[in-house]
Image (cartoon, helix red, strand yellow):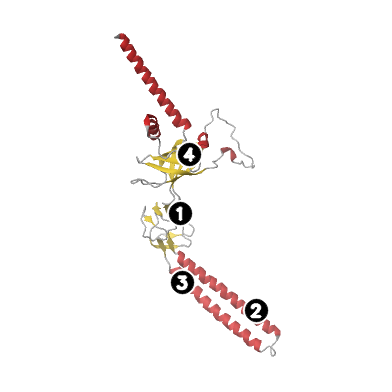
Amino acid sequence: MSVVLRLIRFLITLAILAVAVFIVVQLWNVYMLAPWTRDGRVFAQTVVVAPEVSGTVVSMPLRDNEAVTKGQVLYQIDKSRFQIALAQAQADLDAAQLQEKKAQDDVARRRGLSGLISKEDVVNTGIASSVASANVEGAQAAVDLAKLNLARSTIYAPVSGVVSHLRLQAGDFATAGHPDVALIDTGSFKVIGYFEETKISKIHIGDAVSIKLMGFPQRLTGQVSSIGLGIANQNDAANPNGLPEVNPVFDWVRLAQRIPVYVAIDQLPAGVVLASGMTCSVNVGREVPVAHGITGRVQSWFEDNL
């Protein structure tokens, strides 16, 4: 009986040791060998909208986090001043055109009297006509600018997206060039995975990618679209004398730098909603982690939960 117990204990110990070795090997594969990272972020372009003219906001139909389409009116700046400016520019154009017509008539009349008036008078009349024509062109440009400013008093969405952190309201004064509406471009979502430089050699453009969001159970798929070719160098900053400012401290243990890898996302699964800034795990080299067999299941569990 004692022999049987010793054998059972030996087998249990051996099984525990085998499981421990298996787990250590899987951890080594996940952390050291596989092109996988937990340091992933969902990213979307943010389009900051600023008016090109200044004025009081008279209409603000938007609400925070509202979806808008490209070309939709975001808000309206008071048009009165721009309409008056256009009317003034149009009146100046009409006056300039009358002056041009008079100058052209004077030129035609004096050419008919070329033998009765001096050549200098004819030349001066021609110059006056040219000046009048130039004034018409300037007045026309002023009209075009006034029309442009009037059109710019209505602010449109440059992309389809979602309004974010809206604080502008009717009655506020909008200043030209000052951002007041931010749109998250819903057509620009991507994932950026920050991989250790030791794993970059195993990543290639076009590789299949599996993405696990922290907030959703469903997995996303995608492809590597590009790999970053540069990160900030702390030793590259110049001192006041224009010389490189090199850190004199060098750590004995060198930490691998992280390189951004950009991933284009395939079609989203039902129920998944992306938000810029979400965290995720990124696994390069396979569309969906190997789910067949105990090895694949364990590795997948590590990637999801560690």
Three-letter code for the amino acid on which mark 1 is drawn: Val
- Label 3 packing within 10 angstroms: few (<14), some (14-19), many (20+): few
Toward the viewer: 80 or 30? 30
> Quadrant where the N terminus lies?
top left
Sequence order check, earlier mark of 4 and 1: 1
Sequence order check, earlier mark of 2 and 4: 2
Mark 1 — residue?
A: 48
In percent of the image, x 52 and y 78: which residue is there?
94
- Label 2 packing within 10 angstroms: few (<14), some (14-19), many (20+): some
Judge from the rendering whether residue 104 lies leftward or rightward of residue 83; answer left or right: right
**Pointer 4 and pointer 3: residues touching (CB < 8 Å)?**
no
Q: How far is the residue under mark 2 from the one under mark 3?
A: 33 Å
Mark 2 — residue?
A: 127
Three-letter code for the amino acid on which mark 2 is drawn: Ile
**Pointer 2 and pointer 3: residues touching (CB < 8 Å)?**
no
Circle 3: element type: helix
Three-letter code for the amino acid on which mark 4 is drawn: Tyr
Mark 3 — residue?
A: 84
* Callout in the foreground (1, 3): 1
Q: How far is the residue under mark 2 from the one under mark 4?
A: 69 Å
**Pointer 4 and pointer 1: residues touching (CB < 8 Å)?**
no
Q: How far is the residue under mark 4 from the one under mark 3?
A: 55 Å
